[in-house]
Image: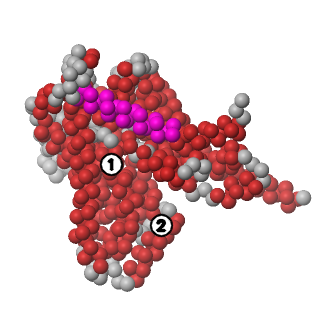
């Protein structure tokens, strides 16, 4: 019979392999299950001969070229804009206290689900939205809503705005996280100060000294953002054009069509989507190489000034416009949720009512419970696997540790629209009709990477001397883990839990596909309402969708504060008792 100690060690040693299996098998299995139908192998329809009919059918789909172009252009432009604005903000405020203020303002935006963000932006730019109301009629002369097609414009400008505003806080917080590392952050700031002392302007000093060392740490987050944007569904579905939509939205529609033969075309489209994403990632990598070659001379020419003051002024304007846009979008959504009669171009409703909230809350009882239960289950599994995997790094080979750190990015770099269809097919093949469990496992694929990335830095920075002292006193690995490491990591664990819940709450496509339409969450309901439902009711659902992750982070911060206060009180009591003795 296995002892508790040996059981703990076995669990720790096996955790990296369990985690890798949970990521690799569904993703790669899902890809295989998409490739087979794409090439004609679909026994359900009696097709057991390989062919390229699915690709031929896809090629003859009206507007297919525009769908692909729209997916590529919106994702690439939005990622470029988010990256440029990120480095401009970092360069302009690198030595300023304003950087921390901007971080606090943009930090909460990170946890807003994509669907809720898209709905909020839609309320801002729609013809009767806050943007047109603020300038009417005193500036625009409009007494009626203008005749424009935003959102749902054919060029995808609304998609670009939505993706940029969602990607920017993520990239900025990733960069600030890198700069928060003690050794690297201290070194880069010291080098920046030296450059300033040599007469370089702040912007030039940042681009010549800090950015070349910072960018390698941002490469994977940027590629993950680019891969996500290329196959995003929620934002293009809510803000994008409908005829034709982006390729990812079209694939989802084909997959859910009552005509099962369209699944072959959907699978072929998923293969094309993977190719487009890979081409985008390759293009970004080649662009990196080109910029590196072209910037070599600039980095060493000794020039101190490159219109730094103008760039700073432009950055100030961009920052104010961006924060104002986000604020107006959220204000507009909150107003619509309580608006009664609201005549255009009045900035405020003539009536404020609570009827929409009352009606929506009565209807969202089941979706709300499902949302919370799925999030709690997926996040709990992710936290357990992450903690044991990080603990295993100290007992397994570095090769396994490096492999697990790379594989963790797999669901982020491969378009979910591709492998999720195959994952559904795998569930069908193993006769898994447990919709709730299927959805939890699908959510885990996306929650686990973010939880791992959130916790890994704090876990790896733990001072090993605490464990060494405890081991020298006879404490087992299990006791060190439970009694020393976990209490020291309580704050990062709680934040990782809140992040995991936020990621789970925002999942639309995994819920829709893995649940087979039988599991409704706040997110699936919000997206459905945003496409044809009442604007006021969709505002309520979007606000609830935003409130859930915000509540998770507030609880995490509150519990962390209570724990730190209780620990401090306990320490003070012990010190007082020792003084009396």
How far is mark 1 from mark 2, CA to CA?
24 Å
Left or right relative to 142: residue 395: right
Picture layout, residue 395 above or below residue 379: below
Label 2 CA crowd tier, 10 Å (few <14, some 14–19, many 20+): some
Q: Residue at x 42, y 45 (%)?
A: 407
Quick one: SS at disc 1? helix
Q: Residue at x 28, y 30 (%)?
A: 34
Residue beneath disc 1: 225
- The residue segment tinted magenta is 17-38
- x, y (%) of residue 20? 47, 40
Residue 250 position by quadrant:
top left
Of the pair 452 and 40, the residue shown nearer to us: 40
Quick one: SS at disc 2? helix
Left or right relative to 32: residue 17: right
Of the pair 51 and 215, the residue shown nearer to us: 51
- x, y (%) of residue 556? 55, 44
Residue 184 badge: 2
Residue 120 shows in the view:
no
């Amino acid at each position: 019979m296995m002892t508790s100690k040996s059981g703990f060690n076995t669990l720790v040693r096996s955790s990296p392999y369990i985690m890798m299996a949970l990521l690799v098998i569904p993703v790669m299995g899902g890809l295989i299950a998409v490739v087979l139908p794409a090439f004609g192998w679909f026994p359900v329809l009696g097709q057991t001969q390989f062919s390229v009919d699915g690709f031929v059918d896809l090629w003859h789909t009206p507007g297919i070229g525009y769908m692909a172009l729209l997916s590529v252009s919106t994702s690439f432009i939005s990622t470029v804009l988010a990256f440029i604005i990120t480095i401009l903000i970092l360069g302009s405020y690198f030595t300023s206290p304003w950087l921390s203020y901007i971080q606090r303002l943009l930090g909460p935006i990170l946890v807003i689900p994509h669907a809720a963000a898209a709905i909020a932006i839609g309320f801002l730019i729609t013809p009767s939205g806050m943007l047109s109301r603020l300038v009417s009629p005193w500036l625009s002369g409009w007494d009626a809503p203008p005749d424009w097609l935003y959102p749902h414009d054919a060029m995808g400008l609304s998609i670009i705005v939505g993706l940029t505003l969602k990607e920017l806080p993520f990239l900025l917080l990733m960069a600030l996280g890198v700069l928060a590392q003690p050794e690297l952050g201290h070194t880069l700031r010291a080098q920046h100060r030296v450059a300033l002392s040599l007469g370089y302007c702040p912007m030039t000093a940042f681009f010549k000294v800090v950015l070349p060392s910072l960018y390698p740490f941002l490469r994977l987050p940027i590629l993950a953002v680019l891969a996500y944007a290329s196959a995003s569904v929620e934002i293009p579905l809510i803000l994008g054009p409908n005829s034709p939509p982006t390729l990812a939205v079209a694939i989802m529609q084909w997959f859910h069509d009552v005509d099962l033969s369209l699944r072959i075309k959907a699978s072929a489209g998923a293969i094309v989507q993977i190719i487009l994403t890979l081409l985008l990632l390759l293009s970004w990598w080649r662009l990196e190489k080109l910029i590196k070659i072209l910037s070599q001379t600039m980095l060493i020419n000794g020039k101190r000034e490159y219109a730094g003051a103008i760039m700073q002024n432009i950055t100030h304007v961009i920052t104010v416009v961006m924060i104002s846009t986000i604020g107006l979008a959220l204000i507009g959504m909150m107003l619509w949720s309580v608006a009664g009669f609201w005549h255009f171009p009045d900035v405020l409703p003539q009536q404020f009512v609570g009827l929409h909230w009352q009606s929506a809350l009565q209807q969202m009882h089941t979706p709300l419970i499902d949302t919370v239960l799925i999030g709690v289950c997926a996040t709990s599994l992710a936290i357990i696997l992450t903690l044991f995997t990080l603990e295993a790094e100290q007992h397994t080979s570095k090769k396994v540790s490096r492999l697990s750190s790379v594989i963790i990015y797999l669901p982020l770099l491969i378009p979910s629209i591709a492998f999720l269809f195959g994952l559904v097919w795998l569930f069908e093949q193993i006769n898994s009709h447990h919709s709730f469990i299927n959805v939890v496992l699908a959510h885990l694929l996306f929650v686990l990477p973010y939880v791992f990335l959130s916790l890994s830095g704090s876990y790896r920075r733990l001072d090993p001397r605490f464990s060494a002292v405890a081991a020298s006193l006879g404490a087992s690995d299990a006791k060190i883990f439970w009694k020393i490491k976990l209490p020291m990591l309580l704050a990062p664990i709680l934040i990782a839990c809140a992040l995991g819940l936020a990621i789970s709450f925002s999942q639309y496509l995994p819920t829709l596909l893995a649940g087979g339409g039988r599991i409704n969450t706040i997110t699936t309901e919000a997206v459905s309402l945003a496409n044809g439902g009442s604007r006021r009711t969709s505002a309520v659902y979007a606000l609830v969708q935003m409130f859930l992750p915000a509540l998770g982070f507030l609880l995490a911060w509150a519990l962390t504060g209570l724990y730190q206060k209780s620990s401090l009180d306990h320490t003070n009591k012990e010190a007082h008792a020792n003084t009396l003795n």
